[in-house]
Amino acid sequence: MKRLRVCVIGGGAAGLAAARHLTSQLNAFDVSVFEQASCIGGTWVYNENTGRDEHGLPIHSSMYRNLRTNLPKEVMAFPDFPFPSEWPSFLTHQQVLQYLQSYTSHFGLYRYIHFNSFVQSIRPIVNQGTSTSLWEVIVVDTPYKKTSVLLFEAVIVCNGRYSVPFIPEIHGLEHFPGLVMHSHDYRHSKIFQQMNVVIVGAGNSGQDICLEIADSSNFVYLSHKRCLPCKLPDNVKECKPIASVASDGGVQFEDGTKVKVDAILLCTGYEIKIPFLDDNCGIQVRNNRVIHLYKHIFAVMNPTLSFIGLCFHVCPFPLFSLQAQFVTAVLSGVKTLPFEEEMLADEEREFQEKLCSGFQEKYAHSLGERQWTYNRAIAHLAGIKTPSTVCKALYDHVIWRRTNFLMDYKNDDFRQIKR
C-alpha cells in the first residue's frame, strides 16, 4: 500500500506531537517535518538575540532568560512521556526544552526533521486522474538558499501562535522619546535598571515580567483594564489603559492620571499569521481567529490541511497530543470527518456560544474551562482513551493560586500519589 506523504510545519511541541503519532504508523505515512531553526523546541528555545536571525528571518521565540512555566509539570506532560519526577513542579524553560529533546530522541523523531528549512508557500493542486488534491509545498534551505518544490497528500500546520507581536494603536506612542519594546523582544530585566516603566497588558506575560522587572526598576505602572486581586510588589502600581503618550515621556491614562516614564513595555499578545498559505487553501484569519476550521483543527474546505496548537488557555502538550491523534486517525482512514455542512455548522455553533458568553472574536480559540469538554470530544472522535480528571482538578487549583497569590504560587511543589 502506498504511504500517505504528510508535511508537518514546525518542530516545536505541537509539530513533535504530530510527528510522534504519525510515525507510529510508518506503514501508513511518509512524514517530513520542516523546522526553520537549527534545532527542535520552537518557542522553548531561548535566543539572546532579537530581530532577525543569521538568515534574515524573524527570530521566532519570545522566550526570556528567567522564564518559568505558569503551569506545573504535572499537567504539562505529553500523556505517554512524563517529566522526570525529581524535577520541581514549575520548570525553567531550559528544563522544558530538555524534556522536548528527550521526547524527540525517545520516539526517534530526529530522522524525520529537516532543519533550517523555511516553508515559503503552500497551495492545493489537482491530483491528476483522481478527485483528490495534492499540496505543493515550497521549502527554502536557508543556509544554501536552495529552493525545493515538494508534493504531499496532507499538511499539518504547527507553526505556533506566539511569534508575531501585536502592537496596539496608542495615541502618540511614535513620539515617545524613551525605550518602547514588545515582550517578544524582552530577554532580561537589566535593560530597565532604575527606570520608571509602564507595562501595557496584564496577561500571563505582563504579570510575570512585571514581577521580574520590579526587582531592578525604580517603579512599574501596570496598565490594564481590570484590577488584580493579588498582592504585587511595593513599587508596582496598577493603572487604567493608556489614553495618550507625549513627546516629553509623559503618559496619560484613561482616568486622567499622568506619569513620566523612561520605558514602555508592550505585553499585548500576539497575532496569528500563516503567511505561507495560499488563498486557495480555504482558510481566513480575522481578528486572530482562523475561520473555517472543524474543532479548531481541520480546514473544512480542504480537510487534508489541519492545524495543531491554535487553542490557548489550555494545558498545551496534552492538548497537542489529543489533536495529533485525531489528525492521525482521520488521515489513516480509521475515522471519518462529518460532511462539510455539518463541520461548518459545528464551528458556527461554538463561535456563537462564545459570543453570547461575552467573548470577543479574538478569543475564538481560547478554551479555558471549556478545554475539558473539548478534550473529551476530541478523544471520542479520535477513538482514544478519555483524559484523566486529575489534570482538571490540579489545573483549577493552580489557576486559583496564581490569581490570588501571584508572587508565591510558583514555589508550590506537587507530588503524584499512587493509589
Image (spheres, helix red, strand yellow):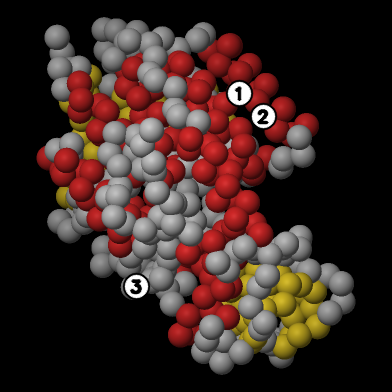
Numbered label attached to residue 49: 3
Instruction: Identify the residue shown where x is 14% and y is 38%.
Output: 108
Q: Tell me which numbered mark, 1 or 3, is placed earlier along the sequence.
A: 3
State whether residue 303 appears in this view. no
The image's mark for residue 75 is none
For the residues labelled 1 and 2, say whether their Cβ atoms are less than 8 Å apart.
yes
Secondary structure found at label 1: helix
Q: Is residue 71 left or right of residue 85?
A: right
Q: Which residue is at a point 73% across and 72% down the rendered structure image?
A: 238
Q: Quadrant of the C terminus?
A: top left
Image quadrant in which you'd find residue 50: bottom left
Q: Position of residue 317 (x, y in %)?
A: 39, 41
Q: Amino acid at mark 3?
A: Asn
Residue 9 horizontal/vertical position (percent) = 32, 40
Q: Can you tell which quarter of the image residue 367 is in?
A: top right
Crowd band around label 3 with a 10 angstrom C-alpha radius: few (<14), some (14–19), many (20+): few
Whether 103 is drawn above or below 184: the answer is above
Real-space Cα separation, disc 1 to disc 2, in angstroms: 6 Å
Can see residue 391? yes
Does label 2 or label 3 sit earlier along the sequence?
3
x, y percent for residue 301: 49, 20
Q: Are marks 2 and 3 in contact (CB under 8 Å)?
A: no
Amino acid identity at mark 2: Phe
Badge 2 is on which residue?
351
The answer to whether residue 270 is above or below residue 160 is: below
Q: Which residue is mark 1?
A: 347
97 or 9, nearer to the observer: 97
